[in-house]
Image (spheres, helix red, strand yellow):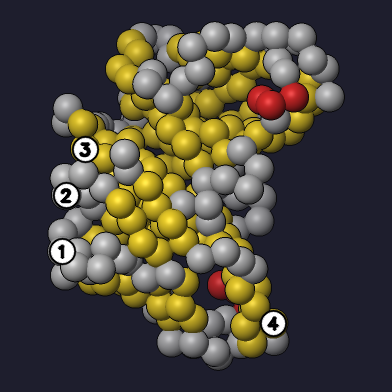
Amino acid sequence: NAGVMQNPRHLVRRRGQEARLRCSPMKGHSHVYWYRQLPEEGLKFMVYLQKENIIDESGMPKERFSAEFPKEGPSILRIQQVVRGDSAAYFCASSPGLADSYNEQFFGPGTRLTVL
Amino acid sequence: GNSVTQMEGPVTLSEEAFLTINCTYTATGYPSLFWYVQYPGEGLQLLLKATKADDKGSNKGFEATYRKETTSFHLEKGSVQVSDSAVYFCALSDPRSGYSTLTFGKGTMLLVSP
């Protein structure tokens, strides 16, 4: 059973370009979480999605960032008009049901975004 | 709000040495506590967890006890191996409306030399 897949693993963009980060959850998992790790900081929650629904986006910046998890295909985190401050590692996690104390979140290897 | 503070690294040890990585937390309510490990080039893996006060989580020789009175969840291992070299993250869950998001510390790098 393949784990959580993220691609690309490394992404370089120039200021003003768009970045698209993809996350394929583990087979059978319908819940996806995105976290961001800025340099010298811990991972911070961004958004929680179920298939075709955004459940909680309280950690997402209000502008330029969006996320989706369509019925078919991977979850996408989209960053428009990237700025240098967006440079970070972006991690995706999935769980089979509601992630709580008993339902573990399984993490992908992350996408490292560098904005020039 | 919730927060997790863990000791800064890197922690450098010789093989078979005793390991302690300190973790303290601030939270409203009654969170669950976790330690995750990240090996180079890989995603985070759950190492152990504890869901209520005085619980002890353990796995692969690592242990941590949920101490509500000191709001701590220190990670310990009696004898580290070179293969334990990785980054360790302490985290707490924040139950909200039936699901949990995780709040992480900054991570502590452990380097074990032969």
Q: CA distance from mark 1 to mark 4?
A: 34 Å
First of labels 4, 2 by sequence position: 2
Query: Image point 49% across, 87% down: which residue?
Result: B18
Eye-nearest disc, 4 or 3? 3
Given contact means CB atoms under 8 Å apart, are the residues at marks 3 and 2 in contact? Answer: no
Tell me the chain of label 3: B
The residue type indicated by label 3 comes to Pro
Given contact means CB atoms under 8 Å apart, are the residues at marks 4 and 3 in contact? Answer: no
Given contact means CB atoms under 8 Å apart, are the residues at marks 2 and 1 in contact? Answer: yes
Q: Is A32 above or below relative to A3?
A: above
* Circle 3 SS class: strand
Given contact means CB atoms under 8 Å apart, are the residues at marks 3 and 1 in contact? Answer: no
> Disc 1 designates what residue?
B53
The residue type indicated by label 2 comes to Tyr
Query: Image point 33% across, 20% down: which residue?
Result: A56
Q: Which numbered dot is residue B30?
A: 2
* Circle 1 SS class: loop
Tell me the chain of label 1: B
Eye-nearest disc, 4 or 2? 2
> Disc 3 designates what residue?
B95
First of labels 1, 4 by sequence position: 1
| Circles 3 and 2 on the same chain | yes
Query: Image point 56% across, 72% down: which residue?
Result: B84
| Circles 4 and 3 on the same chain | yes
> Disc 4 designates what residue?
B113
Q: CA distance from mark 3 to mark 1?
A: 16 Å
| Circles 3 and 1 on the same chain | yes
For this view, does A36 lie left or right of residue A80?
Answer: left
